[in-house]
Image (spheres, helix red, strand yellow):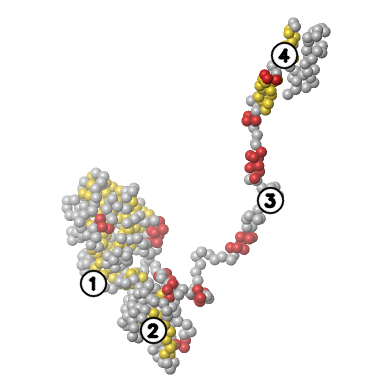
Protein backbone atom coordinates (compact mmCIF):
# COMPACT_ATOMS: atom_id res chain seq x y z
CA UNK A 1 0.00 0.00 0.00
CA UNK A 2 1.36 3.51 -0.89
CA UNK A 3 0.67 6.81 0.86
CA UNK A 4 0.83 10.31 -0.58
CA UNK A 5 3.03 12.98 1.03
CA UNK A 6 1.39 15.44 3.39
CA UNK A 7 2.98 18.94 3.16
CA UNK A 8 2.55 22.63 2.44
CA UNK A 9 2.22 22.45 -1.27
CA UNK A 10 -0.58 24.32 -2.88
CA UNK A 11 -3.78 22.23 -2.93
CA UNK A 12 -7.45 22.95 -2.75
CA UNK A 13 -7.01 26.62 -1.35
CA UNK A 14 -5.49 29.81 -2.83
CA UNK A 15 -2.15 30.03 -1.26
CA UNK A 16 -3.09 29.52 2.38
CA UNK A 17 -0.46 27.84 4.41
CA UNK A 18 -2.87 25.26 5.80
CA UNK A 19 -3.62 23.36 2.68
CA UNK A 20 -2.76 19.76 1.67
CA UNK A 21 -2.73 17.63 -1.47
CA UNK A 22 -1.94 14.06 -2.61
CA UNK A 23 1.19 13.99 -4.72
CA UNK A 24 1.56 10.22 -5.02
CA UNK A 25 1.77 8.68 -8.49
CA UNK A 26 0.56 5.23 -7.39
CA UNK A 27 -1.78 3.86 -4.77
CA UNK A 28 -4.44 5.79 -2.88
CA UNK A 29 -3.89 9.26 -1.33
CA UNK A 30 -5.10 9.98 2.23
CA UNK A 31 -6.05 13.68 1.86
CA UNK A 32 -9.70 14.08 1.09
CA UNK A 33 -10.51 17.83 1.21
CA UNK A 34 -10.26 21.15 3.10
CA UNK A 35 -13.35 22.44 4.77
CA UNK A 36 -12.76 26.03 5.99
CA UNK A 37 -9.56 25.82 7.94
CA UNK A 38 -10.01 22.03 8.55
CA UNK A 39 -7.90 19.60 6.58
CA UNK A 40 -9.84 16.35 6.20
CA UNK A 41 -8.02 13.01 5.70
CA UNK A 42 -9.31 9.52 4.89
CA UNK A 43 -9.07 6.70 7.40
CA UNK A 44 -7.17 3.44 6.74
CA UNK A 45 -8.94 0.04 6.89
CA UNK A 46 -7.94 -3.52 5.93
CA UNK A 47 -9.20 -4.77 2.61
CA UNK A 48 -9.42 -8.40 3.92
CA UNK A 49 -8.73 -10.44 7.05
CA UNK A 50 -5.24 -11.05 5.77
CA UNK A 51 -4.22 -7.50 6.92
CA UNK A 52 -4.21 -6.23 10.51
CA UNK A 53 -4.33 -2.41 11.22
CA UNK A 54 -3.79 -1.10 14.74
CA UNK A 55 -3.12 2.28 16.47
CA UNK A 56 0.26 2.51 18.16
CA UNK A 57 -0.59 5.34 20.52
CA UNK A 58 2.80 5.34 22.17
CA UNK A 59 4.67 6.54 19.15
CA UNK A 60 1.78 8.21 17.29
CA UNK A 61 1.86 5.66 14.43
CA UNK A 62 -0.56 3.33 12.70
CA UNK A 63 0.74 -0.27 12.48
CA UNK A 64 -0.09 -2.26 9.36
CA UNK A 65 0.87 -5.99 9.33
CA UNK A 66 0.12 -9.23 7.51
CA UNK A 67 -2.16 -11.68 9.38
CA UNK A 68 -0.37 -14.97 8.52
CA UNK A 69 -3.00 -17.18 10.11
CA UNK A 70 -5.48 -16.07 7.47
CA UNK A 71 -3.19 -16.64 4.52
CA UNK A 72 -3.85 -19.64 2.23
CA UNK A 73 -0.31 -21.02 2.33
CA UNK A 74 1.94 -23.95 3.35
CA UNK A 75 4.56 -23.52 6.04
CA UNK A 76 8.12 -24.48 5.26
CA UNK A 77 7.85 -27.67 7.30
CA UNK A 78 4.62 -28.61 5.49
CA UNK A 79 6.27 -28.06 2.12
CA UNK A 80 9.27 -30.18 3.22
CA UNK A 81 6.93 -32.97 4.34
CA UNK A 82 5.04 -32.95 1.04
CA UNK A 83 8.24 -32.96 -0.95
CA UNK A 84 9.52 -35.87 1.12
CA UNK A 85 6.69 -38.04 -0.20
CA UNK A 86 7.46 -37.36 -3.83
CA UNK A 87 10.01 -38.92 -6.13
CA UNK A 88 12.45 -37.03 -8.23
CA UNK A 89 11.30 -36.55 -11.82
CA UNK A 90 14.28 -38.63 -12.89
CA UNK A 91 13.47 -41.56 -10.56
CA UNK A 92 13.32 -45.19 -11.80
CA UNK A 93 11.25 -48.15 -10.57
CA UNK A 94 13.82 -50.74 -11.54
CA UNK A 95 15.41 -50.75 -8.07
CA UNK A 96 12.06 -51.41 -6.33
CA UNK A 97 10.22 -53.85 -8.59
CA UNK A 98 10.92 -56.85 -10.81
CA UNK A 99 10.35 -56.39 -14.52
CA UNK A 100 8.11 -58.89 -16.32
CA UNK A 101 11.15 -60.62 -17.73
CA UNK A 102 12.77 -60.90 -14.29
CA UNK A 103 9.56 -62.36 -12.78
CA UNK A 104 9.33 -64.92 -15.60
CA UNK A 105 12.92 -65.96 -14.90
CA UNK A 106 12.23 -66.32 -11.15
CA UNK A 107 9.00 -68.31 -11.70
CA UNK A 108 10.72 -70.57 -14.18
CA UNK A 109 12.81 -71.98 -11.31
CA UNK A 110 9.75 -72.86 -9.18
CA UNK A 111 7.40 -75.88 -9.14
CA UNK A 112 3.62 -75.81 -9.01
CA UNK A 113 2.20 -76.14 -5.48
CA UNK A 114 0.44 -79.35 -6.59
CA UNK A 115 3.57 -81.09 -7.85
CA UNK A 116 4.57 -84.52 -6.53
CA UNK A 117 7.72 -86.62 -6.45
CA UNK A 118 8.09 -90.32 -7.11
CA UNK A 119 10.15 -92.34 -4.67
CA UNK A 120 12.81 -92.68 -7.41
CA UNK A 121 13.38 -88.93 -7.24
CA UNK A 122 15.03 -89.23 -3.80
CA UNK A 123 18.77 -88.69 -4.23
CA UNK A 124 19.89 -87.44 -0.82
CA UNK A 125 19.87 -90.47 1.46
CA UNK A 126 21.22 -88.35 4.31
CA UNK A 127 17.87 -86.53 4.51
CA UNK A 128 15.65 -89.63 4.63
CA UNK A 129 14.06 -89.66 8.13
CA UNK A 130 15.68 -91.84 10.76
CA UNK A 131 13.74 -94.52 12.64
CA UNK A 132 12.76 -92.12 15.40
CA UNK A 133 11.71 -89.31 13.05
CA UNK A 134 8.76 -90.89 11.21
CA UNK A 135 5.46 -90.75 13.05
CA UNK A 136 2.74 -90.00 10.55
CA UNK A 137 0.53 -92.26 8.44
CA UNK A 138 0.97 -89.94 5.44
CA UNK A 139 4.64 -90.98 5.23
CA UNK A 140 3.61 -94.41 3.99
CA UNK A 141 3.12 -95.21 0.30
CA UNK A 142 -0.12 -96.71 -0.97
CA UNK A 143 -0.08 -100.16 -2.58
CA UNK A 144 -1.93 -101.20 -5.72
CA UNK A 145 -5.44 -102.56 -5.85
CA UNK A 146 -5.85 -106.19 -6.91
CA UNK A 147 -7.86 -109.23 -5.91
CA UNK A 148 -6.31 -111.15 -2.97
CA UNK A 149 -5.48 -114.84 -3.20
CA UNK A 150 -5.18 -117.49 -0.52
CA UNK A 151 -1.41 -117.08 -0.49
CA UNK A 152 -1.78 -113.46 0.49
CA UNK A 153 -4.16 -111.82 2.89
CA UNK A 154 -7.83 -112.29 3.51
CA UNK A 155 -10.43 -110.08 1.84
CA UNK A 156 -10.19 -106.35 2.51
CA UNK A 157 -6.43 -106.46 3.18
CA UNK A 158 -4.03 -104.64 0.84
CA UNK A 159 -0.93 -106.27 -0.51
CA UNK A 160 2.04 -105.87 -2.86
CA UNK A 161 1.94 -107.65 -6.22
CA UNK A 162 4.41 -110.25 -7.47
CA UNK A 163 6.81 -107.58 -8.76
CA UNK A 164 6.77 -105.66 -5.45
CA UNK A 165 5.78 -102.57 -7.42
CA UNK A 166 4.15 -99.67 -5.62
CA UNK A 167 1.46 -97.71 -7.41
CA UNK A 168 -1.04 -94.95 -6.74
CA UNK A 169 -4.77 -95.49 -6.93
CA UNK A 170 -7.94 -93.51 -6.23
CA UNK A 171 -10.93 -94.82 -4.31
CA UNK A 172 -13.99 -93.74 -6.24
CA UNK A 173 -17.12 -92.99 -4.25
CA UNK A 174 -19.04 -95.57 -6.33
CA UNK A 175 -16.82 -98.40 -5.11
CA UNK A 176 -16.40 -99.84 -1.68
CA UNK A 177 -17.84 -102.45 0.60
CA UNK A 178 -21.25 -101.42 1.86
CA UNK A 179 -23.76 -102.68 4.38
CA UNK A 180 -27.00 -104.20 3.12
CA UNK A 181 -30.29 -103.58 4.96
CA UNK A 182 -33.12 -106.00 4.16
CA UNK A 183 -36.02 -103.60 4.74
CA UNK A 184 -37.38 -105.86 7.44
CA UNK A 185 -35.48 -106.49 10.63
CA UNK A 186 -31.80 -105.56 10.50
CA UNK A 187 -30.38 -102.28 11.81
CA UNK A 188 -27.58 -100.73 13.87
CA UNK A 189 -28.42 -99.72 17.42
CA UNK A 190 -25.93 -97.01 18.41
CA UNK A 191 -26.96 -97.40 22.07
CA UNK A 192 -26.82 -93.60 22.18
CA UNK A 193 -29.76 -91.28 22.79
CA UNK A 194 -30.53 -88.20 20.74
CA UNK A 195 -29.11 -86.11 23.57
CA UNK A 196 -25.88 -88.12 23.76
CA UNK A 197 -25.33 -87.70 20.01
CA UNK A 198 -26.17 -83.98 20.09
CA UNK A 199 -29.12 -84.30 17.69
CA UNK A 200 -31.73 -82.31 19.60
CA UNK A 201 -33.54 -79.27 18.16
CA UNK A 202 -31.44 -77.15 20.50
CA UNK A 203 -28.16 -78.54 19.11
CA UNK A 204 -25.92 -77.69 16.16
CA UNK A 205 -25.10 -80.83 14.18
CA UNK A 206 -24.56 -82.49 10.80
CA UNK A 207 -25.61 -85.98 9.67
CA UNK A 208 -23.80 -87.67 6.78
CA UNK A 209 -24.73 -90.89 4.98
CA UNK A 210 -24.36 -92.38 1.50
CA UNK A 211 -26.55 -95.08 -0.01
CA UNK A 212 -28.21 -96.65 -3.02
CA UNK A 213 -31.59 -97.84 -1.79
CA UNK A 214 -33.48 -100.57 -3.65
CA UNK A 215 -36.69 -99.16 -2.23
CA UNK A 216 -36.82 -95.54 -1.11
CA UNK A 217 -40.05 -95.55 0.92
CA UNK A 218 -38.43 -96.11 4.30
CA UNK A 219 -37.19 -94.71 7.58
CA UNK A 220 -33.45 -94.19 7.43
CA UNK A 221 -32.60 -93.36 11.04
CA UNK A 222 -33.99 -91.95 14.25
CA UNK A 223 -35.24 -92.43 17.79
CA UNK A 224 -38.88 -91.86 18.66
CA UNK A 225 -41.24 -92.37 21.58
CA UNK A 226 -44.52 -94.17 21.15
CA UNK A 227 -48.02 -92.72 20.79
CA UNK A 228 -49.38 -90.20 21.45
CA UNK A 229 -46.40 -87.80 21.60
CA UNK A 230 -43.89 -89.54 19.29
CA UNK A 231 -41.20 -87.28 20.75
CA UNK A 232 -37.88 -87.64 18.92
CA UNK A 233 -35.80 -87.04 15.78
CA UNK A 234 -36.28 -89.14 12.64
CA UNK A 235 -35.66 -89.15 8.88
CA UNK A 236 -37.47 -90.95 6.09
CA UNK A 237 -37.95 -90.92 2.31
CA UNK A 238 -41.38 -90.89 0.68
CA UNK A 239 -42.34 -92.95 -2.36
CA UNK A 240 -41.97 -89.77 -4.44
CA UNK A 241 -38.32 -89.45 -3.42
CA UNK A 242 -38.91 -86.65 -0.91
CA UNK A 243 -36.47 -86.60 2.02
CA UNK A 244 -38.26 -85.69 5.26
CA UNK A 245 -36.60 -84.80 8.58
CA UNK A 246 -38.72 -84.38 11.73
CA UNK A 247 -38.09 -82.73 15.09
CA UNK A 248 -40.97 -83.89 17.31
CA UNK A 249 -41.93 -82.66 20.74
CA UNK A 250 -45.53 -83.68 20.09
CA UNK A 251 -46.60 -85.14 16.74
CA UNK A 252 -49.80 -83.13 16.39
CA UNK A 253 -49.20 -80.13 18.68
CA UNK A 254 -45.53 -79.18 18.38
CA UNK A 255 -43.55 -80.55 15.44
CA UNK A 256 -41.11 -79.14 12.88
CA UNK A 257 -40.83 -80.92 9.54
CA UNK A 258 -38.13 -80.18 6.95
CA UNK A 259 -38.85 -81.53 3.46
CA UNK A 260 -37.09 -81.57 0.10
CA UNK A 261 -38.83 -81.46 -3.25
CA UNK A 262 -40.05 -84.71 -4.76
CA UNK A 263 -37.33 -86.62 -6.60
CA UNK A 264 -34.42 -85.45 -4.42
CA UNK A 265 -33.72 -89.13 -3.60
CA UNK A 266 -33.90 -91.80 -6.30
CA UNK A 267 -33.91 -95.57 -5.95
CA UNK A 268 -30.82 -97.60 -6.95
CA UNK A 269 -28.69 -94.49 -7.43
CA UNK A 270 -25.71 -93.66 -5.25
CA UNK A 271 -26.52 -90.61 -3.11
CA UNK A 272 -24.28 -88.85 -0.62
CA UNK A 273 -26.51 -87.01 1.84
CA UNK A 274 -25.47 -84.22 4.22
CA UNK A 275 -27.98 -82.68 6.64
CA UNK A 276 -26.82 -79.68 8.68
CA UNK A 277 -28.72 -77.93 11.47
CA UNK A 278 -27.48 -74.57 12.77
CA UNK A 279 -28.93 -73.95 16.21
CA UNK A 280 -28.05 -70.24 16.09
CA UNK A 281 -30.44 -69.72 13.16
CA UNK A 282 -32.62 -72.85 13.55
CA UNK A 283 -32.01 -73.50 9.85
CA UNK A 284 -31.66 -77.01 8.41
CA UNK A 285 -29.91 -77.53 5.05
CA UNK A 286 -29.80 -80.52 2.72
CA UNK A 287 -26.97 -81.46 0.32
CA UNK A 288 -27.29 -84.35 -2.17
CA UNK A 289 -24.04 -85.39 -3.85
CA UNK A 290 -22.50 -82.05 -2.88
CA UNK A 291 -25.34 -79.95 -4.29
CA UNK A 292 -27.56 -77.95 -1.94
CA UNK A 293 -31.23 -78.80 -2.41
CA UNK A 294 -34.33 -76.80 -1.50
CA UNK A 295 -35.28 -77.77 2.05
CA UNK A 296 -38.37 -76.09 3.52
CA UNK A 297 -39.85 -76.07 7.00
CA UNK A 298 -43.44 -76.70 8.06
CA UNK A 299 -44.74 -76.34 11.62
CA UNK A 300 -47.49 -78.55 13.00
CA UNK A 301 -49.38 -76.93 15.88
CA UNK A 302 -47.34 -74.31 17.71
CA UNK A 303 -43.73 -73.42 16.96
CA UNK A 304 -41.22 -75.87 18.37
CA UNK A 305 -39.85 -74.61 21.68
CA UNK A 306 -39.10 -77.76 23.70
CA UNK A 307 -36.41 -80.43 23.64
CA UNK A 308 -37.11 -83.42 21.40
CA UNK A 309 -34.85 -85.85 23.24
CA UNK A 310 -36.12 -89.06 24.80
CA UNK A 311 -34.78 -92.12 26.54
CA UNK A 312 -34.74 -94.37 23.45
CA UNK A 313 -31.65 -95.45 21.51
CA UNK A 314 -30.87 -93.93 18.11
CA UNK A 315 -31.08 -96.49 15.27
CA UNK A 316 -29.44 -96.47 11.83
CA UNK A 317 -31.38 -98.24 9.06
CA UNK A 318 -34.65 -98.10 10.98
CA UNK A 319 -36.43 -96.44 13.88
CA UNK A 320 -36.32 -97.89 17.37
CA UNK A 321 -40.01 -98.82 16.92
CA UNK A 322 -39.38 -100.35 13.48
CA UNK A 323 -41.68 -103.30 14.19
CA UNK A 324 -44.63 -100.91 13.80
CA UNK A 325 -45.90 -101.44 10.24
CA UNK A 326 -46.12 -97.68 9.78
CA UNK A 327 -42.33 -97.36 10.03
CA UNK A 328 -40.75 -99.38 7.24
CA UNK A 329 -36.92 -99.78 7.61
CA UNK A 330 -34.66 -99.06 4.68
CA UNK A 331 -34.01 -101.64 1.99
CA UNK A 332 -30.75 -101.31 0.11
CA UNK A 333 -27.10 -100.52 0.70
CA UNK A 334 -25.48 -97.89 2.88
CA UNK A 335 -21.84 -96.86 2.38
CA UNK A 336 -21.34 -94.94 5.60
CA UNK A 337 -23.08 -92.97 8.35
CA UNK A 338 -21.72 -90.21 10.58
CA UNK A 339 -22.84 -87.57 13.07
CA UNK A 340 -20.87 -84.35 13.60
CA UNK A 341 -21.51 -81.91 16.50
CA UNK A 342 -21.04 -78.95 14.15
CA UNK A 343 -22.20 -77.43 10.86
CA UNK A 344 -19.91 -78.74 8.12
CA UNK A 345 -18.07 -76.25 5.92
CA UNK A 346 -18.35 -76.21 2.14
CA UNK A 347 -14.86 -77.74 1.92
CA UNK A 348 -15.81 -80.55 4.31
CA UNK A 349 -19.02 -81.30 2.39
CA UNK A 350 -17.01 -81.46 -0.85
CA UNK A 351 -14.55 -83.86 0.80
CA UNK A 352 -17.35 -86.09 2.09
CA UNK A 353 -18.91 -86.14 -1.38
CA UNK A 354 -15.53 -87.35 -2.70
CA UNK A 355 -15.42 -90.23 -0.22
CA UNK A 356 -13.29 -88.66 2.51
CA UNK A 357 -13.90 -89.11 6.24
CA UNK A 358 -13.92 -85.70 7.91
CA UNK A 359 -12.50 -85.48 11.43
CA UNK A 360 -14.52 -84.41 14.46
CA UNK A 361 -17.43 -86.86 14.27
CA UNK A 362 -19.15 -88.14 17.39
CA UNK A 363 -19.80 -91.42 15.53
CA UNK A 364 -18.79 -92.50 12.04
CA UNK A 365 -19.36 -95.97 10.57
CA UNK A 366 -17.65 -96.44 7.15
CA UNK A 367 -19.47 -99.80 6.76
CA UNK A 368 -16.56 -101.22 4.75
CA UNK A 369 -15.58 -104.26 6.82
CA UNK A 370 -16.89 -106.75 4.26
CA UNK A 371 -16.90 -109.66 6.72
CA UNK A 372 -18.47 -110.47 10.07
CA UNK A 373 -21.26 -108.60 11.83
CA UNK A 374 -19.30 -105.98 13.76
CA UNK A 375 -19.62 -102.40 12.50
CA UNK A 376 -16.67 -100.25 13.51
CA UNK A 377 -16.82 -96.61 14.59
CA UNK A 378 -13.80 -94.67 13.26
CA UNK A 379 -14.59 -91.35 14.98
CA UNK A 380 -12.12 -92.19 17.73
CA UNK A 381 -14.92 -92.69 20.27
CA UNK A 382 -14.82 -96.51 19.89
CA UNK A 383 -18.62 -96.86 19.63
CA UNK A 384 -18.33 -100.17 17.73
CA UNK A 385 -21.63 -102.00 17.28
CA UNK A 386 -22.99 -105.29 15.94
CA UNK A 387 -25.55 -105.56 13.15
CA UNK A 388 -28.91 -106.54 14.63
CA UNK A 389 -31.59 -108.79 13.17
CA UNK A 390 -30.78 -110.94 10.14
CA UNK A 391 -26.99 -110.94 9.69
CA UNK A 392 -26.56 -113.16 6.64
CA UNK A 393 -25.67 -111.58 3.29
CA UNK A 394 -25.27 -108.15 4.86
CA UNK A 395 -22.19 -107.16 2.85
CA UNK A 396 -22.13 -105.99 -0.72
CA UNK A 397 -18.52 -106.79 -1.63
CA UNK A 398 -17.29 -104.25 -4.18
CA UNK A 399 -13.77 -104.39 -2.69
CA UNK A 400 -12.31 -100.96 -1.95
CA UNK A 401 -9.12 -102.38 -0.40
CA UNK A 402 -9.74 -100.58 2.87
CA UNK A 403 -10.16 -102.43 6.14
CA UNK A 404 -10.66 -101.83 9.82
CA UNK A 405 -8.21 -102.97 12.45
CA UNK A 406 -8.91 -102.68 16.17
CA UNK A 407 -5.47 -101.24 16.90
CA UNK A 408 -5.08 -98.77 14.03
CA UNK A 409 -8.63 -97.94 12.97
CA UNK A 410 -9.87 -97.57 9.41
CA UNK A 411 -6.79 -97.41 7.18
CA UNK A 412 -5.41 -98.43 3.81
CA UNK A 413 -2.34 -100.02 5.35
CA UNK A 414 -1.49 -103.70 4.95
CA UNK A 415 -2.16 -105.65 8.16
CA UNK A 416 -0.35 -108.83 9.25
CA UNK A 417 -1.80 -110.93 12.05
CA UNK A 418 1.51 -112.28 13.41
CA UNK A 419 0.58 -115.84 12.49
CA UNK A 420 0.57 -116.81 8.83
CA UNK A 421 -0.03 -113.60 6.85
CA UNK A 422 2.69 -113.04 4.29
CA UNK A 423 3.56 -111.59 0.90
CA UNK A 424 5.50 -113.76 -1.55
CA UNK A 425 7.52 -111.63 -3.99
CA UNK A 426 9.25 -114.38 -6.03
CA UNK A 427 12.47 -112.38 -5.74
CA UNK A 428 15.82 -113.88 -4.74
CA UNK A 429 18.44 -112.09 -2.59
CA UNK A 430 20.83 -111.56 -5.50
CA UNK A 431 18.18 -109.44 -7.20
CA UNK A 432 17.94 -107.04 -4.27
CA UNK A 433 20.38 -104.17 -4.06
CA UNK A 434 18.65 -102.30 -1.26
CA UNK A 435 15.69 -103.14 0.95
CA UNK A 436 13.36 -100.72 2.71
CA UNK A 437 10.34 -101.25 4.94
CA UNK A 438 7.72 -98.91 6.39
CA UNK A 439 5.76 -100.47 9.24
CA UNK A 440 3.81 -100.02 12.47
CA UNK A 441 4.82 -102.74 14.95
CA UNK A 442 2.29 -104.12 17.41
CA UNK A 443 5.02 -106.02 19.28
CA UNK A 444 8.62 -104.83 19.49
CA UNK A 445 9.82 -106.90 22.46
CA UNK A 446 10.27 -110.34 20.85
CA UNK A 447 13.57 -111.92 21.85
CA UNK A 448 14.20 -115.44 20.58
CA UNK A 449 14.48 -115.24 16.82
CA UNK A 450 12.82 -111.84 16.69
CA UNK A 451 9.84 -110.76 14.59
CA UNK A 452 10.67 -110.89 10.89
CA UNK A 453 9.58 -107.91 8.79
CA UNK A 454 10.93 -109.26 5.53
CA UNK A 455 13.51 -111.80 4.48
CA UNK A 456 14.58 -114.97 2.69
CA UNK A 457 15.21 -118.28 4.46
CA UNK A 458 17.19 -119.94 1.66
CA UNK A 459 20.98 -120.27 1.64
CA UNK A 460 22.57 -116.83 1.58
CA UNK A 461 19.56 -115.54 3.44
CA UNK A 462 18.94 -111.94 4.44
CA UNK A 463 16.30 -110.48 6.69
CA UNK A 464 15.02 -107.40 8.51
CA UNK A 465 13.49 -108.04 11.93
CA UNK A 466 12.47 -106.60 15.29
CA UNK A 467 14.25 -107.93 18.36
CA UNK A 468 14.41 -106.64 21.93
CA UNK A 469 12.86 -103.27 21.03
CA UNK A 470 15.39 -102.72 18.24
CA UNK A 471 15.66 -103.23 14.49
CA UNK A 472 18.01 -106.01 13.46
CA UNK A 473 19.31 -106.68 9.94
CA UNK A 474 21.12 -109.86 8.99
CA UNK A 475 22.86 -111.28 5.94
CA UNK A 476 24.55 -114.67 5.71
CA UNK A 477 26.88 -116.68 3.58
CA UNK A 478 28.60 -119.31 5.73
CA UNK A 479 27.93 -117.41 8.95
CA UNK A 480 25.28 -114.90 9.91
CA UNK A 481 26.31 -111.27 10.29
CA UNK A 482 23.81 -109.20 12.26
CA UNK A 483 23.56 -105.44 12.66
CA UNK A 484 21.34 -104.19 15.49
CA UNK A 485 19.98 -100.66 15.49
CA UNK A 486 20.34 -98.27 18.42
CA UNK A 487 16.86 -96.71 18.33
CA UNK A 488 14.39 -98.07 20.89
CA UNK A 489 11.10 -98.69 19.12
CA UNK A 490 7.61 -98.08 20.54
CA UNK A 491 4.64 -100.29 19.72
CA UNK A 492 2.03 -98.52 17.64
CA UNK A 493 4.39 -95.91 16.16
CA UNK A 494 5.14 -95.94 12.41
CA UNK A 495 8.75 -96.33 11.24
CA UNK A 496 10.74 -96.54 8.03
CA UNK A 497 13.94 -98.58 7.82
User: For the residue carrying disc 3, how many other residues have a C-alpha within 10 Å: few (<14), some (14-19), or many (20+)?
Assistant: few
Disc on res. 41: 4
User: Of helix, strand and loop, which one carries label 3?
Assistant: loop
**Residue named by callout 1:** 392
Residue at 43% over, 72% down: 134
Q: Earlier in the sequence, mark 4 or mark 1?
A: 4
Q: Earlier in the sequence, mark 1 or mark 3?
A: 3
Q: Is residue 191 left or right of residue 82?
A: left
Residue at 17% over, 53% down: 227
**Residue named by callout 3:** 91
Which is more foreground, mark 2 or mark 4? 4
Residue at 40% over, 56% down: 346
Q: Earlier in the sequence, mark 3 or mark 2?
A: 3
Residue 11 in picture, x, y percent from top left: 80, 11
User: For the residue carrying disc 4, how many other residues have a C-alpha within 10 Å: few (<14), some (14-19), or many (20+)?
Assistant: some
- Nearest the viewer among 245 and 438 is 438
**Residue named by callout 2:** 424
**From what the image shows, is residue 33 above or below residue 353?**
above
User: Of helix, strand and loop, which one carries label 2?
Assistant: loop
Q: Quadrant of residue 82?
A: top right
User: For the residue carrying disc 1, how many other residues have a C-alpha within 10 Å: few (<14), some (14-19), or many (20+)?
Assistant: few
User: Which quadrant is the N terminus positioned in?
Assistant: top right
Q: CA distance from mark 2 to mark 1?
A: 33 Å
Q: CA distance from mark 4 to mark 1?
A: 128 Å
Circle 4/circle 1 CB separation < 8 Å: no
Q: CA distance from mark 3 to mark 4?
A: 61 Å
Residue 287 in picture, x, y percent from top left: 36, 56
Which is more foreground, mark 1 or mark 3? 3
Which is more foreground, mark 2 or mark 1? 2
Q: CA distance from mark 1 to mark 3?
A: 84 Å
- Nearest the viewer among 371 and 57 is 57
Amino acid sequence: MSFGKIGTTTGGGSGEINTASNVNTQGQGLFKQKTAENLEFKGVKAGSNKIDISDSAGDNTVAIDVNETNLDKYTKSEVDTLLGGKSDTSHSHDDRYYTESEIDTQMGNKSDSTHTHASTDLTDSANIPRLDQVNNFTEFPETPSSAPSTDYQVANKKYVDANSALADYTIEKETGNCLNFNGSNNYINTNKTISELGLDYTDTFSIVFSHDFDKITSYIFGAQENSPDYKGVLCNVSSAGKLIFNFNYHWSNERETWSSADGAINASIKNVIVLTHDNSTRIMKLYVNGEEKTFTKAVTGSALSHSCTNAFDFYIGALNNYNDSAYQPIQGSMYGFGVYPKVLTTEEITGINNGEITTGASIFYPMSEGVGTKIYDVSGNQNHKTMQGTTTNIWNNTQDNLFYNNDYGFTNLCYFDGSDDRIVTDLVPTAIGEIEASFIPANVSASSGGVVILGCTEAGRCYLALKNDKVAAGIANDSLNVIVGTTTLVSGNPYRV
